[in-house]
Amino acid sequence: MRLLDSNLSGADGAFLEIVNILVLNDAEQIKVQEIYIIEIDNWFSMKWRNFAGKNLVPCWLTPIRVPAFHPNRVLGEKHFVFNKYYGYREVPVKRRIQHLEKGPYHPPTLTKIQDISKSAVFAWYSANADSNKAASLMIYQSNRDRVLTWYAEFKWNGKWFLYKTQGIDRNKLNTRLELTVDSCTD
């Protein structure tokens, strides 16, 4: 099954396949009812993991909240719901995870991930991966009373390879992807 048959705007097709594999793997592993996928305009760093925004200083809050991406960076969003007969199927987005209002920046409402769903995988991935030769994927797993998060960065060198991870074991992630890695560690 593919969640992203084509990109929302400008992500590389091979990178989208990595996103599909990892998002579905996480969703099936913890048996969540929903999947949210958000496309961000460009590569983003691991500092976004668990980042809740800033007023005068950056902050990372608990409980985990929706990352405070500027609306100008959010290109699109998809929502999928699990059906026992058909698996995950796309449904219209009723409640946006990321605010999409363009224009002057207003600090976001710091929505708790678990206020959105207690059974979901939330995925943020970077567009323009082909031109940047770098790509990001950030996953939040909401499962009952806890939220686990991880981040992976990929680089292009004739093919996509896992470059950095945070919040997930690099070797386990590589095993899931069946990629050969010859770069830096966590």
Image: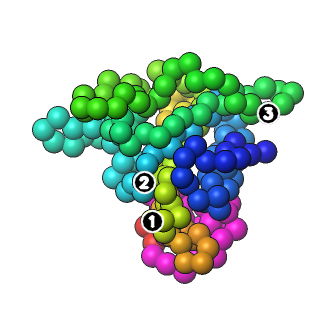
Q: At label 2, which amino acid type do we have?
A: Asn
Per the rendering, the mark at residue 87 is 3
Q: Residue at x 36, y 48 (%)?
A: 48
- Pointers 1 and 3 in contact (CB under 8 A)? no
SS class of the residue under badge 1?
Answer: helix
- On the question of residue 50 being in view, the answer is no
Report the magenta residues as a range: 163-184
SS class of the residue under badge 2?
Answer: loop
Circle 1 packing at 10 Å, graded few (<14), some (14-19), many (20+), is: few
- Pointers 1 and 2 in contact (CB under 8 A)? yes
User: Which residue is the site of mark 1?
Assistant: 132
- Say left or right for 25 vs 107: right
Report the residue that reaches farthest toward the bottom: 182
Does 172 lie within the magenta span? yes
Determine the image quadrant of residue 102: top left
Q: Residue at x 63, y 54 (%)?
A: 16
Q: Residue at x 82, y 27 (%)?
A: 84
Of callouts 1 and 2, the N-terminal one: 2
Residue 57, how many percent across, how many down? 16, 42
Of callouts 1 and 3, the N-terminal one: 3
- Distance from Cα at disc 1 to Cα at disc 2: 8 Å
Q: Nearer the viewer, residue 167 or 70?
A: 70
Residue 29, how many percent across, how many down? 70, 43
- Distance from Cα at disc 1 to Cα at disc 3: 33 Å
Residue 73, how many percent across, how many down? 38, 43
Q: At label 1, which amino acid type do we have?
A: Asn
Q: Nearer the viewer, residue 149 or 126?
A: 126
Q: At label 3, which amino acid type do we have?
A: Gly
- On the question of residue 155 being in view, the answer is yes
User: Which residue is the site of mark 2?
Assistant: 42
Does 140 lie within the magenta span? no
